[in-house]
Amino acid sequence: MRIVSLLPAATDLVATLGKAGDLVGRTHECDWPAEIASVPVVTAADLDSDTLTSREISTAVGSSHQGSSLYSVDLDRLAALAPDLVLTQDLCEVCAVSYTRVAAAVRMLDAGPRVLSLEPRTLDEVLDCLTTLGDALGVPEVAAARVAELRSRLAAVRRQVAGLPRPRVVALEWLDPLWPAGHWVPEQISAAGGAPSLAEPGEHTHPMTWDAVVAARPDVLLVLPCGFSPDRTETELDVLTLRPGWADLPAVRNNRVWLLDGPAYFNRPGPRVVRGAEILATVLHDRPADPPVSPAEARRI
């Protein structure tokens, strides 16, 4: 089957199912696993996020968090690739090309590939995507085995932290304006033995004030901006550290502010969210992870 993935998380799912070799097209943001680097890119970003600040990006996107033209699709290349299946999403137009735009583009092609939209909001729904995609790719047994493995790892994390004190945790998926991490992230925090604040499981969140963070009095503060590498995030940390009351936060006083790799383990609804929970168990309770948590995955600020 010839697959075009217009969603980085979908590329992760395809690879987890052992079908990376069937990918004939991907987005410019698909960066895992390394073997997909040679797959042709069919999208481009209309914003240069490497040179813009978080505030500038937010202003360009629009305060509603619903960008209408953040990404462009190379229709000529897409047509030339002649995909049988196009993977996309309709959860957030800021994160990837939306189902609506992809469906409109596909209608312009001579051949009519199937368009499959993946829109999980919770950990269970992320794992369900493996099942759905496994059926679509004709490998349901592989999908069932992968789901079982991932559920077993989540259960192991929960056992590790059972009975331990649950620190109050605030997770930030954007810095300016401040945006709490919702959808599956509160569940990752809970699985790792934390008490998530300012967002509910499955919730599509909205901007919040700094006062809300101060009032939450987090014991642990997680910084994991959507689409930003840890190194990129570090260039803007003063957006947080210069705010009034920063030094008085319990997390800051106790040196429990963590910079995490959001795109790899928290922002994308792919199988690596389970690794995200394992990372958090180390961050919140110093529980061992296999493999051990590296500075590239999580480091103190």
Image (cartoon, grey):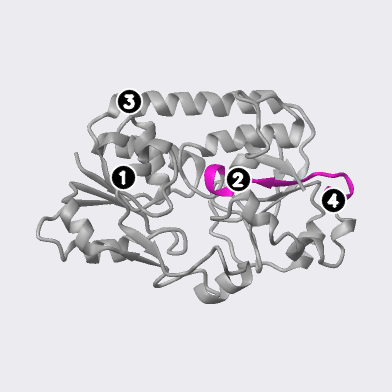
Residue 162 % position (x, y): 71, 26
- Marks 1 and 2, how far apart at CA: 24 Å
Q: Is residue 150 above or below residue 189?
A: above
Find disc 2 in the rendering and name its residue: 261
State the residue at coordinates (54%, 34%).
274
Residue 248 % position (x, y): 90, 57
Instruction: Compare residues 201 and 286 and report the one nearer the observer.
Output: 286
Assess whether residue 262 is covered by the magenta stretch. yes
Contact between marks 4 and 3 (CB within 8 A): the answer is no
- Secondary structure at badge 1 equals loop
Quick one: label 1 or label 4, which is nearer the N terminus? 1
> Dot 4 surroundings within 10 Å: few (below 14), some, or many (20 or more)?
some
**Which quadrant would the N terminus be assigned to in this image?**
top left
> Dot 2 surroundings within 10 Å: few (below 14), some, or many (20 or more)?
many
- Marks 1 and 4, how far apart at CA: 43 Å
Contact between marks 2 and 3 (CB within 8 A): the answer is no
Instruction: Compare residues 187 and 89 and report the one nearer the observer.
Output: 89
Find disc 3 in the rendering and name its residue: 142
Magenta segment boundaries in residue numbering? 250-265
Q: Which mark is residue 252?
A: 4
Quick one: label 2 or label 4, which is nearer the N terminus? 4
> Dot 3 surroundings within 10 Å: few (below 14), some, or many (20 or more)?
some
Residue 143 as seen in the image, left or right of residue 205: left
Front: mark 1 or 3:
1
Q: Is residue 199 at least partly visible in the picture? A: no
Find disc 1 in the rendering and name its residue: 39
Front: mark 2 or 4:
2
Contact between marks 1 and 2 (CB within 8 A): the answer is no
Q: Amino acid at mark 4?
A: Val
